[in-house]
Image: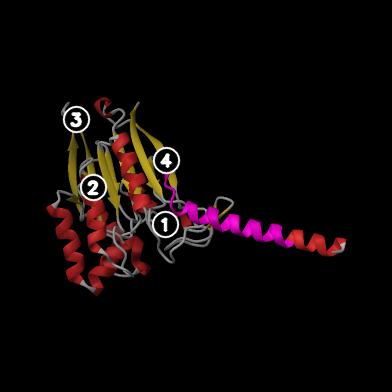
Amino acid sequence: MNKKKLIKKIAFSLTALILVLSTVFLLIGNFYVDVQQIHIFNDKIPESFHNYLIAHVSDYHNRTSSIVDKQILDSLKEEQPDIIVITGDLIDSKSTKVDVALEFTRKLCEIAPVYYVTGNHESNVWRSDESEFNRLIDGLSDMGVTLLRNSSVKIRNEAGDYFYLHGIDDPYFYGGYEQDFQRTEILCDDLNINDEELNVLLAHHPETLSVYYKYNFDLVFSGHAHGGQITFFGKAIMAPDQVTFPPYTEGLYKMVDTQLVLSRGIGYSMFPLRVFCNPHLIYAEFKAK
């Protein structure tokens, strides 16, 4: 074998090895949950709520992975959050498995009180098979999940202090994306918001952050964007209902005094693969000033 052929063979072998290793790395990333800790500072947080811990789960899409579920549940059992919030798309409208979603949520309920709002996939299932949607909602209610469907609750502690936890339905229940912002405004307008107290909102869509700011929410938990699901060099190319190179994909965002905690989610959306965008579990911890 001459030198040129040998070089070509080595180059081909290295390329093949890189492709194989890259594929393995991508597949492993789909089954490894990233855990993120976020501190929430706000003057409205009562001193007795200092270190109050909220676990944020989103976009489960009735994913059937015992490996992913175990990591999430093990982390929750170790951290022992005060509450767990689910911000929509617990099921997937393209492959709806209500029993899978309910079993996962039942395990969450064994760890901490659970609060839930709907996402666009719940609205899609509601349109295509209302009985399946009702089975999900009834099942969640029966196991003790607090359903925040355009409603609010007071989260009160032993000291007698409290904050308001609000939740809105996905705006797709009331129409398509073309009036997403207007419908979100209508839903927020129906909530009883006391600006002097700490107001936390569960809402599936992050792209309507300007609406949440308009209504003076202090803290918002959202999902929907899936972190872009495909990222290169830490940048997402696209996300549902956002422009190319979306501005809201994951982590903590601020618009003046309104903070948005955005989860990359757990399951899949457009296709069954995450590229450099692992499943995501967030812990948001209150810090009284």
Query: Does any portion of residue 171 appear in the rendered image?
Result: yes
Bin the neighbour count of mark 4 within 10 Å (Cα to Cα): few under 14, some 14-19, many 20 and up: some
Determine contact: label 2, label 3, CB under 8 Å. Answer: no
What segment carries the magenta color? Answer: 12-36
Q: Please identify the quadrant where the C terminus is shown.
A: top left
Mark 3: amino acid: Asp
Bin the neighbour count of mark 1 within 10 Å (Cα to Cα): few under 14, some 14-19, many 20 and up: many
Comes first in the chain, label 2 or label 4: 4
The residue sitting at the bottom extreme is 128
Q: Which of marks 1 and 4 is in front?
A: 4
Q: In this view, does 284 lie above or below 160?
A: below
User: Is 27 in the magenta?
Assistant: yes
Distance CA(mark 1)–CA(mark 4): 17 Å
Q: Which mark is residue 161?
A: 3
Bin the neighbour count of mark 3 within 10 Å (Cα to Cα): few under 14, some 14-19, many 20 and up: some
Q: Please identify the quadrant where the N terminus is shown.
A: bottom right
Distance CA(mark 2)–CA(mark 3): 28 Å
Q: Is residue 212 left or right of residue 21?
A: left
Distance CA(mark 2)–CA(mark 4): 21 Å
Q: Is residue 216 left or right of residue 153?
A: right
Residue drawn where x is 36% and y is 45% of the image: 71
Q: Name the residue under label 4.
A: 36
Comes first in the chain, label 2 or label 1: 2
Comes first in the chain, label 3 or label 4: 4
The residue sitting at the right extreme is 2
SS at mark 4?
A: strand
Q: Name the residue under label 2.
A: 107
Mark 4: amino acid: Gln
